[in-house]
């Protein structure tokens, strides 16, 4: 039986704050991407998703505020730098970039929920679950706009199957 990742079983408050700061950088990235993509997507087939991306941008800002509050609660300073934002002149590429980012975010937030619970931080886990629900809605919107199946992200961040819990 594979061993769980050490992050899942031996998490500290400091490490959780570091991981939440990485998530915060990803939320900043999403805000920037959604703001830009919502304004530059053109063509009748993209008007619905462009309007959705504007809504997503506002939701991602809410996520960043929640994460910042949780990081502060853990006694650390929230980061101020976004992860790099990929752009393209091709609308389909932009949507795929967003979908790839959402997939990574969902995998990470699933880990974060387990890590919060391992520390007994159940309220924080619940906050992240609420964020996770919206991120999964974003994933569905993007996959639908691309005309593809919603990706299965039940594997770990590097594509490895998650270890079974007993």
Image (tube, grey):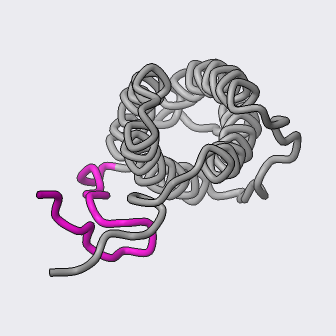
Judge whether residue 31 can be spotted in this image: yes
The magenta segment: 147-166
Whether residue 149 is in magenta: the answer is yes
Q: Is residue 135 above or below residue 164?
A: above
Q: Is residue 62 left or right of residue 9?
A: right
Query: Quadrant of the image for the N terminus?
Result: bottom left
Does residue 48 appear anywhere in the picture? Answer: no
Q: Residue at x 41, y 51 (%)?
A: 111
Residue 29: within the magenta? no
Rendered image quadrant of residue 39? top right
Q: Classify the position of the C terminus by image quarter.
A: bottom left
The residue under the point 40% across, 58% down is 8
Spot occupied by residue 124 in the image (x, y as percentages of width and height): 49, 25
Return the x and y of residue 99 as percentages of the image width and height: 48, 51
> Could you tell whether 90 is left or right of 40 in the image?
left
Of residues 155 and 144, the one drawn nearer to the viewer in this rendering: 155
The x, y position of residue 65, in whole percent, is 70, 21
């Amino acid at each position: 039986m594979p061993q769980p990742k050490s992050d899942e079983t031996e998490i500290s408050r400091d490490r959780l704050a570091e991981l939440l700061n990485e998530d915060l950088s990803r939320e900043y990235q999403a805000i920037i991407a959604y703001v830009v993509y919502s304004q530059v997507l053109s063509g009748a087939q993209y008007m619905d998703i462009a309007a959705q991306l504007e809504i997503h941008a506002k939701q991602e800002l809410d996520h960043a505020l929640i994460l910042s509050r949780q990081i502060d609660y853990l006694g650390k300073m929230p980061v101020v730098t976004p992860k790099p934002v990929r752009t393209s002149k091709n609308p389909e590429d932009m949507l795929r970039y967003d979908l790839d980012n959402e997939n990574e975010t969902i995998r990470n937030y699933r880990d974060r929920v387990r890590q919060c619970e391992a520390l007994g931080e159940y309220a924080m886990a619940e906050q992240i679950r609420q964020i996770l629900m919206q991120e999964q809605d974003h994933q569905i919107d993007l996959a639908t706009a691309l005309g593809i199946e919603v990706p299965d992200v039940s594997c770990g961040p590097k594509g490895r199957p998650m270890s079974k819990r007993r």
